[in-house]
Structure formats: C-alpha cells, structure tokens
Amino acid sequence: MLYQIYEAQRSLMEPFADFAQAAAKMYGNPLNPFGKNPFSQRLSASYDLLYRLGKDYEKPAFNLKSIETGNGADIVVHERVELDKPFCELLRFKRFSDDAETLETLKGQPAVLIVAPLSGHYATLLRDTVKAMLRDHKVYITDWKNARTVPLSEGEFHLDDYVNYVQEFIRHLQGIYGNCHVISVCQPTVPVLAAVSLMASRGELTPLSMTMMGGPIDARKSPTAVNNLAMNKSYEWFENNVIYRVPDNFPGAGRRVYPGFMQHTGFVAMNPDRHLKSHYDYFKDLIKGDDASTEAHRKFYDEYNAVLDMDADYYLETIQTVFQDFKLVNGTWDVRSEEGNPERVRPQDITTTALLTIEGELDDISGAGQTKAAHDLCTGIPANQQEHLEAKGAGHYGIFSGRRWRDEVYPVVKAFIHTHNTVDEPAPTQKPAATRRAAPVKAASAPRGRSAKGKTA
C-alpha cells in the first residue's frame, strides 16, 4: 500500500512542480521588467528550489559523446547495448578515430568490465569512472534495469542470477579479446568475487585482474550505519517492512521489490544536515547568480535523486548472505548455476587473477578493512599480484568519482591493470598483500608482455 500512496503523492506533486519551474523562469527572466529586482530574484530562486524538491528524477544518461586521450587526441564515443538480459544491459562504449595511429593505440588497450552497483542508484553514478577509464581502456559496464519496468513474465531475480550474469559478461569479453579485467564498485565486490571464484573452481579462464573498490567483502569489520541496520534487523523484518508490490501503472506491476524511494530516504537520512545545507547553499547561489555552483548542485542531485527498484529476492538474499550470515567469509556460500546446480564459492581457488583493493579513509558506507578482507580470502593469488590502496581523505564516492578519483585513485588502477595485462608465473612464497597510500602514480608506459588485441576499439 505504501508504494501506491507514494505514487499518488508523486502524481499530485507533479503539476505543482511544473508550476514552480515555470514561475522560476518567469521571475528570473532577464527580459522581465522586474527581473532585476532583488525580490524577484528571491522568488525565482525559491520556485527553482521548490521545483527541484518536487520533480520526478528519471534515469540520467551517460552522455559521453567524446573524450580526450592521454596524448591529447579527441576520439568519438558511441554507447551501445552489447547484451540485453531481462534485468541488465551490458553497455559498450565504443571509441572511434579517423587517425590511424590513434586507432591502432586504442585497439591495443586492455578490455575492462565495470560492474556497477545494484543498490538503489543507476549505473550512471559511475559516469566519472567510465570517462576516466575510456582514455586508456576498452570499457564495458553493467547497466542494471529498474525492477518496476521488468514484467512478471521475466521471472524472479536472485543474487545467484547476479553472479551468473557477471560470469556471462566476463566470458563475452574473453570471447572477443582473449581475456579482460574486472572492476567492481561497492555492492558488486561480493558477487564479482563469487563469480571469479566459481570460474576458477571449474578450471575456466579467469580475468587478468580484479579491482575491488569500497565493497562489503567482510561487513563485520568497522561496521557502518548501513551495516548496522542490515545486521540488527531480522530477515523477516526486512521482508515485512520494506518489500512492496509495483503498482499497476508500471510494466512490472505486481512484482515484489525494494522500492527506490525507500532507499533514497535512507541515503538522505544518513546525512540530513549535509543535504539541508547543500540545498540552502543552492538557494543562495541562485540569488548571487553563481552559475558554476548551481550547475554543480544540479548535476549531483540529478544523479543522486534518480533511484531504481530492486527485485525483492535479490535484495533480501543480499542482506542475508552479505550482512547477516557472512557466507562469503565463512566459506558457506553456495551459488546455483544456470543449470541449477549448487556450487560452493571458494576464493582460495583463484590463482591467475591479480587483485587490487581500494578503500576510502573516510568511507561511511563500507568501513575500513571490509574491502581489504578480500586478500585474506584469495590465498591462492601470489603476493606479487596483490595490492591494496587507501585513498587518504576520500569518502565513499571519492574513490570512484571526482578529483581524488581522477588524480589519486585512477592512476593506481591504470598502472595495476597495465602491469597485470599478462599472466605472471606464480610466486614461490606467500606474503601479506602490499599496502600503499593514495598518491599520484605514474602509469606504466606499456603493458608487460603482449596486450590482448581486439578488432575494435
């Protein structure tokens, strides 16, 4: 019933939001005789803020049309759907250039699968991640669908299905390029580690490297407010209090979901003062005419306020597996394969995939040590293929977006991928994973050995 009430309230607010938008433009129009009046400017700012608080935020676009490579060349980027699954699209950002030398360089660069979170926000939250990676890599990303748009005829979506999707996407890139690298941000660190573990246990070819950023591999370490909520409430509590059926006005009508608006409410409730101050600063910037600051505010909240519903089975199983039973770290996690066979997740079976873990010093979503715990599980990976990075001064979003990501984290990721773009011989002894502090790192000038070649860039 709550979902229906929310939709009714949203529909009721829509005409008022439209009116506020029109009023903001009218009072702020420089051709308006009263447009320069301080009172009109305040009215315009007030209506603009009211519009942004009341509007419906739809799925944003990546809008990556072109990028500049490291050598200063401009290349065109075309976004296309590579694979279309019921609950996810695999997007490819194909790069084009009419310069033969640039094109040859692009073809020789590593292929990277970025696994985006399915935790309330759209994959476009990683726009900055994709934009940086495109300069030196062939980039693919998982674009998870809003569960309320998936008809009931497509069936349920479980955590096991997520793991199987990741394996299928890895095999797809391997079929094109011979092999690939995988980056997971936040929530997908757990299913990605499971996917690679299962592939290793079967004797399949595994990715050349895994980069895991700010994820709850072991949520028992330095638990945050997010972790505590998941740990202190029972499975039944979540099922009875946060799971609702999609209303009739959506394609997924009747599907059991964890609604995006509830996740968004939880996000805001974690830092209400910060959001209140941000909106007040936006109001003041509108009055001052600070276009740069107001545009930055709009871009952030256009992304932050756009949320999606998650299938109930997937959401509840993630809560239970990751935050309550800790099945990955306890070695008790069985994943059902596409053929329906249960398979035990054994990270210790991974031997030929290099591992980089990244944590933010000030991360209030995935606490210190939660991501680094992957090294304790992946005992079969040689020490010279393991590395950990703590990004000083970075919060959760800072490790994959913004200045710290571009200047401090990305150079490390780039160097790690290029260093491990071929499989090294296993080291004779095991040592603790190396730890490094966040600092700009000069990337390797070329991959060691031969790069995986592809027909396209």
Image: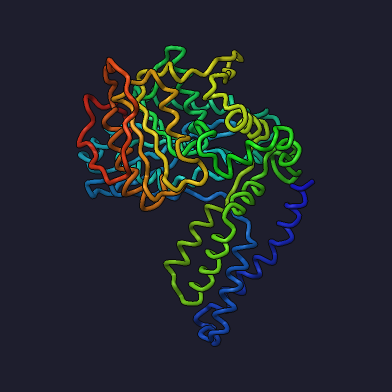
Residue in view at x 71 percent, y 41 percent:
242
Residue 304 visible from this viewpoint: yes
Q: Is residue 410 above or below residue 315?
A: below
Q: Which of these two is toward me, 202 or 272? A: 272
- Give residue 106's quadrant in the image: top left
Q: Is residue 162 above or below residue 2?
A: above
- Give residue 228's quadrant in the image: top right
Residue in view at x 69 percent, y 61 percent:
14
Place of residue 189 in the rendered image (x, y in percent of width and height, measured from the top left): 48, 32
Q: Which of these two is toward me, 56 or 428? A: 428
Q: How many marks?
A: 0
Residue in view at x 52 percent, y 64 percent:
278
Q: Which of these two is toward me, 146 or 430? A: 430
Quadrant of image for the C terminus: top left
Residue in view at x 51 percent, y 39 percent:
222
Place of residue 339 in the rendered image (x, y in percent of width and height, measured from the top left): 59, 14
| Residue 155 appears left or right of 1 | left
Residue 58 visible from this viewpoint: no
| Residue 78 appears left or right of 426 | right
